[in-house]
Every structure is written in structure tokens, then in C-alpha cells.
Amino acid sequence: MTPADIRDEILDILEDIAPDEDLGELKDEVAFREQLELDSMDFLDIVMELRKRHRVQVPEEDYGELASMHSTVTYLTPLMKDLQKA
């Protein structure tokens, strides 16, 4: 998957987790928690969806890497580079 594909996938996951949020104005460099009404369970849902959809394992010590769209895409790009977009 390309970084653009990964970004689209994260947006899709966020739409499922927070359907009432306006993701059109999401800033890539700003932490998700500063822009969206996400709690720790929502964050874990993101991690679980990545595992369920793409078998991507994110160790707990790396959860901080998923703070913003930019950091999430940067972190996931090497892990998901060989995956095909569904």
C-alpha cells in the first residue's frame, strides 16, 4: 500500500469509529485527540481494526506513533508496503 492508500484506510477506520466526526478538516500534523472526540477505547479500536483488516501488529510501546495522521502513515508505511489495497 502507498502512503495515500494507508491514509485513506485510516480515514475509513476513523469514520467507522467516530461516525459523527467531520474528517474533511482533519489536519495531518495535529494529534487525533486534539481534533476528534476520541477516548482511549476508540484509540484501541483503531489498533484492533488495523490488526483485523490487515494483520498489522502494533506493539503497545508503539501506540504513541499513531498520534496523528502523519505519524500514523509514517509508522505504517514500512509495515504495509507489501499489502494490496482491498
Image (cartoon, grey):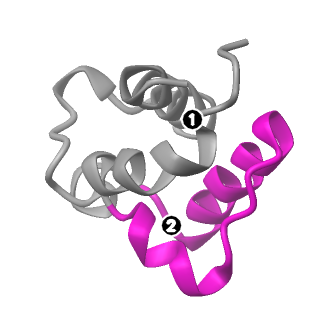
Amino acid under disc 1: Lys
Question: Which residue: 45% across, 58% down?
Answer: 38
Q: Which mark is residue 81?
A: 1
Work out whether residue 7 or residue 23 is closer to the camera in this orientation and state it. 7
The image quadrant that residue 30 belongs to is bottom left
> Left or right of 47: which side holds 32?
left
Q: Main secondary structure of the magenta part?
A: helix
The image quadrant that residue 57 belongs to is bottom right
Above/below status of 68 relative to 73: below
User: What are the residue bounds of the magenta stretch?
Assistant: 38-67
Report x, y in % for residue 72.
Answer: 40, 53
- Location of the C terminus (image quadrant): top right
User: Label 2, on which residue?
Assistant: 39
In the image, farthest residue toward the bottom: 61
The image quadrant that residue 12 belongs to is top right
Amino acid under disc 2: Asp
Question: Which residue: 25% across, 60% down?
Answer: 31
Q: Nearer the viewer, mark 1 or mark 2?
A: 1
Above/below status of 62 relative to 6: below
Q: Residues within 10 Å of mark 1 (few under 14, many from 20)?
A: few
Report x, y in % for residue 66.
Answer: 43, 62
Work out whether residue 12 or residue 51 is closer to the camera in this orientation and state it. 51
> Left or right of 5: which side holds 54?
right
